[in-house]
Image: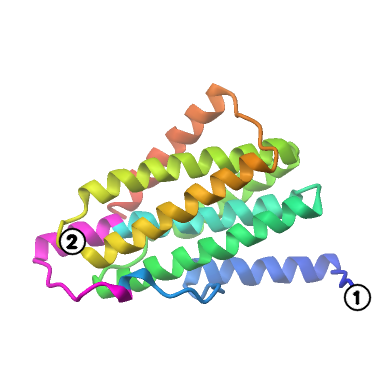
Amino acid sequence: MTTRYYTPVDVLLINLDQALRTVFGRPTTTGRSNPATATPPTELSSEARQQAGRLMRVNHSGEVCAQALYQGQALTAQLDAVRGQMEQASNEENDHLAWCAARLKELDTRPSLLNPLFYAGALTIGALAGKAGDRWSLGFVAETERQVIQHLNAHLERLPSEDQPSRAILEQMREDEARHATGALAAGGASLPLAVRALMRGMSKVMTQTTYWV
């Protein structure tokens, strides 16, 4: 088997393509079925549709950020094994991104206008986390996924009870995020300082509150 080496220009173009696919809605997925397709069709009131749409817009933006974080961390990872783990997790997050995008269309809701801004910020944060070292980068993944799970739990409580398609998507996302967190810790992820964890929660709060409306 031969190993392919990429020039800096190759790497730039590959990452630019990934960025455009993420922000503008054509991600490369693993091919897993959308969990929503296994649920019976439901009719939502106008108010329930609006609430579900806003919540799923937040989740869609969260997946845009997740893609950027993993991309940035993969770019600066020191070990090939860690880079491969980041890329595998990124592929699964692309499934989430595609599922959320499809549900937004069904709910007649647009993605957040702030997605390009959040993508750029998350990419920078991911690259810095990778630069700090693989143990810290993996710890950052684990903490990010823990906070995402908390966020998903809150959204599952706020979703209209009759919106089973959105609920199925979020439940599968929660399962995947838990596996990513466990894998990152098993690979040697370090526990982040309290101040860093608090800063991450604050930034997440800004993202969720703005994308709910914009």
- At 86% from the left and 73% from the top, the residue drawn is 4
105 vs 160, nearest the viewer: 160
**Is 46 a magenta residue?**
yes
Q: How far apart are the alpha carbons under marks 1 and 2?
A: 52 Å
Residue 194 in the image, given as x and y percentages of width and height: 53, 22
57 sits to left or right of 98: left
Q: Is residue 78 above or below residue 96?
A: above
Residue under the point 35% across and 56% down: 171
What amino acid type is highlighted by mark number 1? Thr
Mark whose residue sits in front, 1 or 2: 1
Magenta span of residues: 37-55
Instruction: Determine which residue is flagged by label 1.
Output: 2
Question: Where does label 2 land, which residue?
Answer: 50
Q: Secondary structure at mark 2?
A: helix
Residue 144: x %, y % from top left: 52, 42
- Image quadrant in which you'd find residue 189: top right
Question: Local crowd at mark 2 within 10 Å, few (<14), some, or many (≥20)?
Answer: some
User: What's the residue at 36%, 64% (across, down)?
Assistant: 111
Q: Quadrant of the N terminus?
A: bottom right
Q: Is residue 105 left or right of residue 16?
A: left
Question: In terms of depth relative to the viewer, which is nearer, 117 or 201?
Answer: 201
Of 18 and 151, nearer the camera is 151
Q: In this rendering, is residue 173 above or below 130?
A: below
How are the residues colored? rainbow
Amino acid carrying mark 2 in the image: Gln
For label 1, count other residues whose C-alpha is less than 10 Å away and answer few (under 14), some (14-19) or many (20+): few
> What residue is at 28 percent from the left and 60 percent from the top?
167
Asked whether residue 60 appears in the rendered view, the answer is yes
Residue 209 left/right relative to 79:
left
**Disc number for residue 160:** none
